[in-house]
């Protein structure tokens, strides 16, 4: 273990509010604006492994304890601390970080009906393996709300979310039930990018991180993701006959200008087309510029070699393609040493639920589908070998 070192799916949500229809305001597709952020059933040895008992499944699910912690910006974050049942000594612990948008400690968002439950399912899996966890309501969600940003939400940038996670990790490490030498940070979607920053940025004053979990993580620079997704949607609109070619070309030209201005100057151009204004506006300007400074593959390549990594993509993921996650895999492969478990979750959607041959269009996120059994067993083995035994 390392000695202590000092170290410092908002685009999804913004895009969901972006009106990118043609002049007649017709939607280009039901999936318009899904930014960051497959029909193979589990077979053979993977299926058998997923049905087997976890090697460390002895901790019980435990019970949640309501907690609060305050970040340096004055925001009081509300969360749930889960400690395994019958824990008799300090146990390894995992900080769980949600994806983009106003996502709460369970993994649910106001923009999605039903129960997504991504983080709660992860907490259950960890507790059964004798691992404590902390999950929390992100800024703008649950009991946390907007706090000091309520009067001026345009002040929010990506680094604020990083600092909130960093404070959560400090809080988790300070709990008497937690072994401070066996800490893991696990992020879903945009949370994966935050987890990479926490583990790689030595300017952040956080406890030593021994492992990182990256679950369908944001894998491209933020503005690149936006460009790719909006381009695909505009082209689909042209092909479907709902958007004239010349209108699509004009929007693509504006998009290129917007991205260049945000990247180079941190400012929007003087004129933004109304079709793009819900996504690119003064409220999002600071966040988008700040988030785009981080390249996930470069962060992965510079992770300390004593940090072990579990990296998973999902074949039915419509927000983060496995081909994008391959860029993070390649970054991790550049490390001169260090353990990495690479996984492809078959028949699983972006929120880590099993959809099998039905595939995914996003409408099923809140439905009571099974949480990925493959992920449960693989994550169980990872924490057994990398947190319990290491």
Image: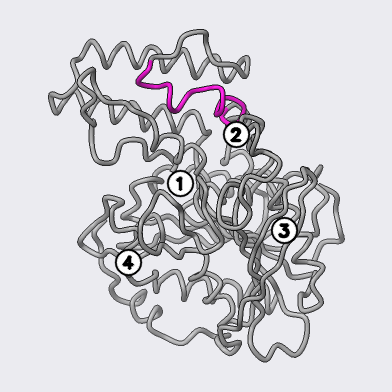
Name the quadrant containing residue 159: top right
Tag nearer the camera, 4 or 3: 3
Distance in Å between CA atoms under marks 2 and 1: 20 Å
Q: Which residues are magenta?
A: 274-288
Q: In this image, 47 relative to 131: left or right? A: left
Q: Residue at x 79, y 72 (%)?
A: 175
Tell me, for residue 291, which label it has, or none.
Answer: 2
- Mark 2 or 4, nearer chain start: 2
Q: Pointer 4: what residue? A: 354
Residue 313, above or below 328: below
Distance in Å between CA atoms under marks 3 and 1: 29 Å
Decide: few, some or many residues near mark 3? Use Cα within 10 Å; few <14, some 14-19, many ≥20: many
Q: Pointer 3: what residue? A: 168
Residue in the foreground of this view, choosing between 138 and 195: 138
- Mark 2 or 1, nearer chain start: 2
Decide: few, some or many residues near mark 2? Use Cα within 10 Å; few <14, some 14-19, many ≥20: some
Residue 178, above or below 166: below
Q: Pointer 1: what residue? A: 326
Q: In this image, 8 relative to 317: left or right? A: right
Residue 304, above or below 245: below
Q: Residue at x 61, y 63 (%)?
A: 135
Distance in Å between CA atoms under marks 2 and 3: 20 Å
Residue in the foreground of this view, choosing between 221 and 88: 88
Distance in Å between CA atoms under marks 2 and 4: 30 Å
Mark 2 in CB contact with mark 4 (< 8 angstroms): no
For this orientation, the residue located farthest to the left is: 241
């Amino acid at each position: 273990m390392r000695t202590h070192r000092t170290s410092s799916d908002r685009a999804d949500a913004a895009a969901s509010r972006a009106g990118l229809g043609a002049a007649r305001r017709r939607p280009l597709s039901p999936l318009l604006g899904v930014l960051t952020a497959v029909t193979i059933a589990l077979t053979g040895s993977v299926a058998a492994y997923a049905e087997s008992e976890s090697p460390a499944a002895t901790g019980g699910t435990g019970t949640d304890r309501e907690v609060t912690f305050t970040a340096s910006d004055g925001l009081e974050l509300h969360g749930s601390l889960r400690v395994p049942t019958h824990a008799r000594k300090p146990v390894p612990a995992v900080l769980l970080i949600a994806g983009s948008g106003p996502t709460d400690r369970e993994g649910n968002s106001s923009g999605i009906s039903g129960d997504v439950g991504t983080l709660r399912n992860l907490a259950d899996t960890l507790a059964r393996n004798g691992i404590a966890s902390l999950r929390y309501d992100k800024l703008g969600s649950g009991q946390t709300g907007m706090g000091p940003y309520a009067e001026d939400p345009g002040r929010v940038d990506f680094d604020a979310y990083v600092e909130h996670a960093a404070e959560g990790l400090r809080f988790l490490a300070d709990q008497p039930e937690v072994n401070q030498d066996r800490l893991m940070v696990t992020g879903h979607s945009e949370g994966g990018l935050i987890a990479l920053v926490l583990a790689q940025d030595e300017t952040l004053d956080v406890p030593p991180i021994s492992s990182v979990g990256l679950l369908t993580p944001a894998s491209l620079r933020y503005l690149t993701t936006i460009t790719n997704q909006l381009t695909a949607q505009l082209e689909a609109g042209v092909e479907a006959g709902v958007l004239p070619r010349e209108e699509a070309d004009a929007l693509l030209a504006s998009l290129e200008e917007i991205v260049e201005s945000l990247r180079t100057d941190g400012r929007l151009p003087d004129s933004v087309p109304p079709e793009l204004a819900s996504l690119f506006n003064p409220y999002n300007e600071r966040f988008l510029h700040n988030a785009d400074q981080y390249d996930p593959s470069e962060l992965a390549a510079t992770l300390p070699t004593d940090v072990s990594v579990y990296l998973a993509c999902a074949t039915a993921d419509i927000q983060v393609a496995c081909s994008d996650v391959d860029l993070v895999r390649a970054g991790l492969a550049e490390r001169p040493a260090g353990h990495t478990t690479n996984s492809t979750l078959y028949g699983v959607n972006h929120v880590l639920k099993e959809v099998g041959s039905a595939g995914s269009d996003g409408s099923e996120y809140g439905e009571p589908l099974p949480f990925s059994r493959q992920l449960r067993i693989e994550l169980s083995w990872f924490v057994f070998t990398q947190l319990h035994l290491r």
